[in-house]
Image (cartoon, grey):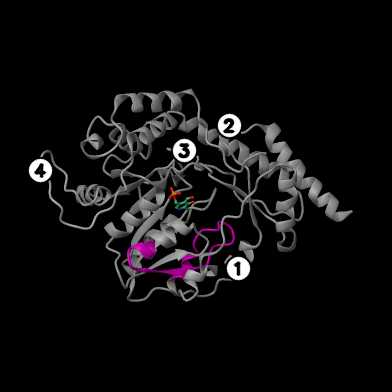
């Protein structure tokens, strides 16, 4: 089977975990202070995003980062948060966890990121924040995001689960948005097995994060207090050790994933009726590579490829299709409806060989030749 995602776990990660386990510093409380793997991981993220003035806090998952990011942005019961309907369920559940409701917006046809022109029509007095998510190998129009948030006085949660290590107009992702979240789950370009991080504006926001991620415990040596509701969302040291090892290979990871996406595009873009992403993949760290397949053939292609040992995926079922969100507010969803039935994610790994990619490409070519015959 050629898996859809495959983590790049090598000697460095094994050694890092071994050392972290042997150190006995596994996870909680003072172990997260200076000198811990978690602390170093946070500092290294600061370096990667080239934003020493920003404040990075690591957490246990991308979902936890979203939940805490929304809370730090002041989102609470009765509020609304605008998000693309084509997004990970983690975003919808994180909104619900604050007591707010998601409001679903359509996407842009070229980038599959949120369509901010349509989002304008969704803003009400209850809107507190907007989640903007970089999709697969595309970045949102973050200049427009900044204007939009200013115009409507909204907090921005930049879901950069797919874009750690990418640049927007020369600036590293994580360095320019209001609040940025990263996911380092098992499928991501850079993994901690499970992990996440928030990039925040101030020490005060970071202090809040420290309390929220550790059951409300105020920081400080010796005695502590509990002054608010808290969660158990800290990142454990062995996970941070894996992340640290991965970070040493980030340039390699980015380079090889861009090369793989370009190879797919070169081989597939002249194969009607497929539509490939319209990008040269400059300055991104692609998490996923997707193609668009005519609706009536998409599922059959997926089954065909599976029979040939090739795993593919659909990212994702639109949020407004779920039972839980049947009554959630939304407007025109025409692009999401159409593209949601066309998108198919193909296997993409760091250091993926052309030989493996050719197996995927030939599978797709054979499917369409069979269809024509
Ligand atoms: C866009 C997006 N946001 C959030 C998440 C949630 O991250 P995690 O799996 O680390 O909780 C994911 C996970 O795949 C994602 O793709």
Mark 2 Cβ and ligand 1 under 8 Å apart = no
Q: Which residue is mark 4?
A: 223
Name which residue lies at 68% across and 35% down: 356
Is disc 3 surrounded by few (<14), some (14 to 19) or many (20+) residues within 10 Å?
A: many
- Is residue 211 in the magenta section? no
Residue at label 2? 351
First in sequence, mark 2 or 3: give its number. 3
> Badge 1: how crowded within 10 Å, few (<14), some, or many (20+)?
some
Rendered position, 16 above or below 198:
above
* Residue farthest to the right, as pictured: 373
Disc marking residue 272: none
Residue 103 covered by magenta stretch: yes
Residue designated by label 3: 190
Identify which residue, 230 or 152, lies in the foreground: 230
Distance from mark 3 CB to nearest ligand 1 atom below 8 Å:
no
Mark-to-mark CA distance, 1 and 4: 54 Å
Can I make out residue 118 in this image? no
Instruction: Identify which residue is drawn at 19% across, 51% down.
Output: 204
Q: How far is mark 2 from mark 3, CA to CA? A: 13 Å
């Amino acid at each position: 089977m050629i898996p859809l995602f495959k983590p790049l776990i090598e000697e460095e990660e094994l050694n890092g975990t071994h050392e972290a386990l042997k150190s006995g510093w596994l996870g909680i409380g003072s172990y997260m202070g200076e000198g811990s793997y978690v602390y170093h991981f946070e500092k290294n993220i600061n370096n990667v995003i080239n934003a020493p003035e920003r404040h990075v806090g690591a957490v246990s998952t991308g979902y936890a980062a979203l939940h805490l990011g929304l809370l730090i942005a002041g989102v609470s019961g009765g509020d609304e948060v605008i998000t693309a309907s084509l997004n990970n369920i983690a975003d919808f559940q994180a909104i619900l966890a604050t007591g707010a409701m998601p409001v679903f917006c359509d996407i842009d046809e070229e980038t599959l990121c949120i369509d901010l022109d349509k989002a304008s029509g969704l803003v009400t007095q209850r809107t507190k924040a907007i989640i903007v998510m970089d999709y697969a190998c595309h970045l949102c129009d973050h200049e427009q995001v900044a204007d939009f948030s200013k115009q409507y006085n909204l907090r921005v949660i930049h879901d950069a689960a797919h874009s750690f290590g990418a640049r927007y107009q020369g600036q590293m992702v994580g360095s320019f948005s209001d609040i940025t979240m990263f996911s380092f789950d098992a499928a991501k370009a850079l993994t901690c097995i499970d992990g996440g991080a928030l990039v925040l504006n101030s020490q005060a926001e970071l202090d809040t994060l420290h309390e929220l991620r550790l059951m409300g415990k105020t920081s400080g040596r010796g005695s502590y207090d509990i002054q608010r509701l808290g969660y158990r969302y800290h990142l454990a040291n062995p996970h941070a050790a894996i992340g640290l090892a991965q970070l040493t290979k980030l340039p390699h990871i980015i380079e090889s994933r861009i090369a793989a996406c370009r190879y797919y595009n070169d081989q597939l873009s002249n194969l009607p009726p497929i539509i490939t992403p319209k990008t040269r993949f400059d300055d991104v760290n692609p998490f996923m590579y997707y193609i668009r397949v005519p609706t009536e053939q998409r599922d059959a292609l997926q089954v065909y490829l599976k029979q040939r040992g090739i795993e593919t995926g659909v990212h994702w079922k639109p949020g407004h299709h779920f039972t839980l969100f049947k009554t959630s507010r939304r407007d025109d969803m025409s692009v999401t409806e159409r593209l949601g039935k066309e998108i198919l994610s193909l296997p993409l790994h760091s250091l993926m060989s052309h030989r493996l990619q050719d197996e995927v490409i030939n599978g797709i070519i054979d499917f369409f030749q069979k269809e024509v015959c």
